[in-house]
Amino acid sequence: MRLTLKNGFALAVYSFTFLLGLPANLLVLFVYIRKARKRGATPNVVYALNLCLANLALVAWLPVKALETLLQDWMLPAPVCPVYSFFLYSSLYGSCLFIAVVTVGRYLSIAFPIAYKQYRRARFSCLISAALWALVLFHLSISLVAEGGAYFVSSNEDSSACYDHLNMSQLAVLLPLRLEMAVVLFLLPLAVTSFCTLRCVMLVWRSNLRPAGKRRVLAVALSTLVVFVVCYAPYNASHVVGFVLQTNVEWRTTAMLTSLCNVFLEPVVMMMLSPAVSRGILGKICGRQSQFRRSDCGRLRWKPTNGAPSFRAPTLLEKNQAVMEETGVSHGQKETPAERYAVGKRQKTDNLAARWKKKALKTGTM
């Protein structure tokens, strides 16, 4: 059977996504597993691994979709169709939720570094991941009620199709469910992602971070939002339009092609979020552009070159004196133990908050 232009374009997208997405996600999976073994699991690692698993599940079923498009017929057994649809759509909506969670974690690490550090545990991240997967699987399990023994396979005289031509009884269940999934699994995560991204942009823009560091953090934040909108907005828009028109819109399969792009776009964002990549870029900035010493890069000490005057950070005694003057303790007055304790505690808290906020702004990670 001769391929149409639409099917030929879809086949090209499936093939390109498989060839590019499989090695990209395997590379990200290797990088984050290695990171977890060396330095322990962090929220960033947990969510990145879940994103990789979701993408790999989608990649694994792409050859089936490509074969169906090439032959224009469903050649596999009918019970395979709901299983294929289940994994395909669970990976898409799972990616939506995990991108939103990654963005929330990035915002909290920048805006509330000390408070967020107390809850920055892999155990909490695993529980959140399990809850998100349960939410997605719950919605998709309801869709299995609509198959009605036909396994979503529609047949005509020459060919059959999987989850394409649906009858009225199936649409009566699927159309409201699609609308609810578009609202809960896409629009709400999109609102959360947009809010956190804009807040990150404002905080980074107002910070004292160097221009190169600002550009990198802004690029990571905005690229995450762009990937979210470009990949998932068209397909979820078909759910809303289909519910309004009470039909299975014809351009729904075409809109789904943009959702497949997340398979090779998300690994790029995840590599940008990787602490190893962040340290590599920061090392280049510190070593080549501003001539910071690597050991003193985090403390912002300037390395003297060519006889230029050096600038040193204030010593601990100078910091204590500044704090004493600010709190009203004069140099000639002998402070009490309670005052010394208050000064030391305040200084320790300020230094810890500044260090964590500076690290979050530079790396843009959780």
Image: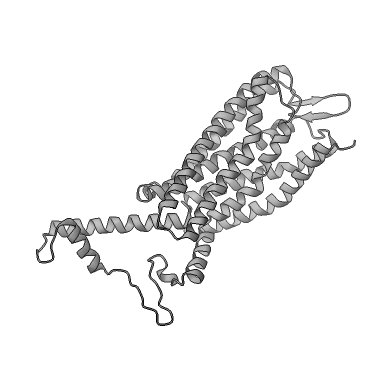
Residue 148 % position (x, y): 70, 20
Vertical order, 129 against 205 (above or below):
above
Image: 100 above or below 44: above
Residue 36 seen anywhere in this rendered image of the structure: no
x and y, in percent, of residue 282 in the image: 49, 63
Q: Please give left or right for residue 137 compared with residue 4 in the image.
A: left
Please give left or right for residue 139 compared with residue 362 in the image.
Answer: right
Q: Is residue 32 left or right of residue 115?
A: right
Residue 137 is left or right of residue 331, and the answer is: right
Rendered image quadrant of residue 323: bottom left
Picture quarter containing residue 353? bottom left
Q: Could you tell me residue 293's position as x and y percent?
A: 43, 72
Residue at image x 51%, y 52%?
218
Depth order, front residue of 132/150: 132
In this rendered view, identify the residue nearer to me: 113 or 159: 113
Up-down relation of residue 358 to residue 257 (above or below): below
Residue in the picture at 62% in, 36% down: 233
The residue depicted at 70 percent of the width and 17 percent of the height is 169
Residue in the foreground of this view, choosing between 224 and 20: 224
Residue 352 in percent (x, y) is at: 33, 57
